[in-house]
Structure formats: structure tokens, C-alpha cells
Image (tube, helix red, strand yellow):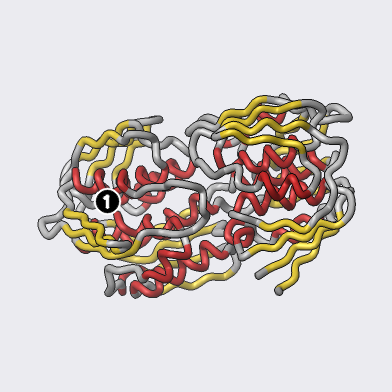
Amino acid sequence: MRRYEIRGGRALSGGVVLQGAKNSALPLMAASALCTEGKVCFENCPVLEDTSLTERILVSLGCGVTRKGGLMTVDPSGICRCSVCREYCAGMRSSILFLGPLLARFGRAEMFLPGGCLLGARPVDIHIKGLEKMGADVRVEGDRITAACPRGLRGAAIELPFPSVGATENMMTAASLAEGKTVIENAAAEPEIGDLADLINRMGGHVRADGGRITVFGVKRLHGCRKRIIPDRIAAFTFFAAALATNGNIMVRGADPAHLRAAMRALEKTGAAFEISEDGIGVRRALDRILPTEIVTAPYPGFPTDDMALAMALLTVADGVSSLRETVFSDRFALTDELLKMGADMTVRRNVALVTGVHRLRGAAVRATDLRAGAALIVAGLAAEGETLIEDDGHIARGYENIVGTLSALGADITEREN
């Protein structure tokens, strides 16, 4: 158990170097298992609990893995297992992303229903149905998933019922070694999908991503390569929200504005001013107050669900009433009770939250219920009067690299302790 202690009221200032994207690193690491010749080297790989767990999964399968800071090298030539143990699956939702690569390379795979953040129903049926269309026999017995395709996978026409990022990634990796052409319609279009397509192509595959349609031409084998992971757009939004909540002025170096258009538009409506340069994106308040706004989550290029809790924390100190509608995960507003402890004024009915801004939040003892809720509570604590104590079971370290050191360098009064 970790405890974050924050003494709020300090405006953030200075610059931060943006970490590599967690939501890209995890599928890329899983996809490295497709490689049969050479090594896969990842640059800008963030040092996180989730990347460490994914590294342990790779090692448990027989991969050689070395890491030096942000450089990770994976040697998948020695893979000798096709199963991911229950402990690793329970610890991380993204463990399901090994299903496609293992099935494609070895014709079989075994794992367990994944865990991770509790964000409501997040079924894996869409993953399974897509693989079955490619010729796999997939069975779920209790929490165990077994998949087999003794004659190999075959290209297929797959239309996803909604643009699931994880399912799109599993279909892409499975199709990369399948026989023939696979076309995925209504596919996710997030920047992380493009990053995965780039990795497969660098390994000798043939993937063409065109918005909601992805075409994959299967190849016989994939080889090693070097790949730089894109910057983390959700971490960028976190720093934006923290700067605005504290009336600060910071530069997020390495942030890619092309990945952040919807998020930046939403913040501009609250009175944020952005300055885009070759180094990254600067952010500050254009007004002496935060304006209320309306936000609705949507698949990319819409407003990201991962940013919703952070937006909620920011808007608790807006001058007026904001409306937030969540369309992706049913429990994204689980942090509501924690923010109420800090003096926030909000009501939630089903998937809509009405947030009435208050002049100042008050420090309180709160608990992180999931990764982004934990980050949102940090934002709230930075803006609050007095001391905020955040109890955390390890959620925050799953997605943020040295968050305490980074915020401290920007002028925040924040410390971390192990309970």
C-alpha cells in the first residue's frame, strides 16, 4: 500500500519530459512474441508497474528481456510456453493481448480472464469472436481461456460491434501471421493502434491502417527491429489538468498535438491557453478562473475515457456547472465519493455527472479506486487547501513514471510513503 501526501495550493511551473505511452508499450511488448528471428528493441519504454508485469510475462514464456532505463530489448526466440499464469492475468487487463500473438505463432494459447482496474463490464467476447472468425477454437471454462488453431489461422472479414482498442490489437497481431488477408471493420483508430501497425511493419509484416478499417496481409514469419514508443497522451492531459487546477504554467516536452486535439479542445473551453512548439506543448490559464463545460467521451478521435476522471477533478473548481457524460466504461465516476470528501459539489446519475464548481477544495483522506481516479485525486490534492492523503493499492504507479519526482520538480509539495 502506498500513501501520497500532498500539501496543495502551489502553482506548478517549469517543464516536464513526457514518458512513453503505457497504452502503446503494453500491446507492443505482447506483439514482440510474434518475432522468431532477432530481437525487438523498444526506445522510450516507460518504467511502470504494468510494463514490469508485462516483462515478467515475457520472461515466464521463455523470452530474454533486458532493460536500461527507457530502452528495453526483448529476445523472443526462446519462447517455450504458450500459457500466461493466473497471477499475471489477474494483475493486468492488458494480459489478454498475449492471446493473439501466442495463438498466431504457436497455434495454441492458454490464459485466464484478465484483471486490472475495476471499470465496470469489460468483456472479452469481442476478442474471442474475432479469433473464431479466423479459424480458432476458443473456449472459456470458469476463468480459464484456451484457444487452438492446429491448422493455423486464416484471414477473415471481421466487423467489430464497437471500436474496442484491445480487440483491434488482438486481431491485428493474430492476423499478422495468418494465411491470407484480414480486414477489420469498425476498428479502433487510436494513436496506439498506429504504433502497433508500425511495429508489425518494422518486423516484416504488412498492415495498412486507414481510420476505422485495418487491412492485414499475413506473412510467414516476423523478425526483430527497433521501435520508439509514442509519447503518452493521457499523461500529457494529466499534467495539463494539474497546471490548470493550480493556476500554473508548464511545458510538456515531447507531447504530440496531433494525438491531443479533442483533449485540448475540451480544455480550451475551460479557458486553457496552449502554446505549441517543436519542444512540446505549453499550457496555462488564459483567464483568472476555470470555465464550466460539457464533455462527452467517445472513441478516438473523440474525447478519451481515460481523461474523464482528470477532467472531473479539474472542473470541481470551475466557475459554474459542468456536464460530463461517460459512454465507454460504466464505473468511470467511481471517484465521486472521494472528491465529495474534499468538498466537491457533484451528482451522478447513471453515466452523467453534474459538477458544480467550488471556490476551493479541502484536503482530506481519500482512496484511489483505479489508475486514472488516483491521478485525478492527485490533481485535486494539488489544487486543494491543506493536506490530502491518498491511499493507493499501487494503481497510480501502473501508469505514471516517477509521478512524485516529476510533480516535485514542477513545484508541487508531494511525497510518497510505503505503508
Judge left or right: residue 79 versus residue 27: left
The x and y percentages for residue 207 are 32, 41
| 154, above or below 70, in the image | above
Count of numbered tags: 1
Disc 1 marks a residue whose amino acid type is Ala
**Residue 300 in view here:** no
Q: Nearer the viewer, residue 115 or 88?
A: 115
Numbered disc 1: secondary structure: helix
Q: Is residue 189 above or below residue 142?
A: above
Image height of 173 relative to 92, above or below: above
The picture quadrant where one finds residue 87 is bottom left
Residue, x 89% and y 54% (percent of image)?
386
Asked if one can make out residue 151 in the rendered structure from this viewpoint, the answer is: yes
- Residue drawn at (68%, 58%), measured in percent from left and top? 367
- Residue 320 vertical position relative to residue 61 in the rendered view, above or below: above
Q: Is 12 on the left or on the right of 177, as rendered?
A: right
Q: Point out residue 173 in the picture as x, y percentages from the top left corner.
A: 31, 50
Q: Nearer the viewer, residue 316 or 45?
A: 316
- Give the position of the C terminus as an image quadrant: bottom right
**If the image is split into quadrants, where does the N terminus sit?**
bottom right
- Give how far across and how far down residue 179 sits, in percent: 16, 47
Q: Is residue 31 left or right of residue 371?
A: left
Q: Which residue, given by chain and number where applicable, does mark 1 sit on?
A: 174
Q: Quadrant of residue 27?
A: bottom left
Residue furthest to the left in view is 151
Q: Position of residue 235 (x, y in %)?
A: 64, 48
> Looking at the image, which residue is at 39% across and 36% down?
163
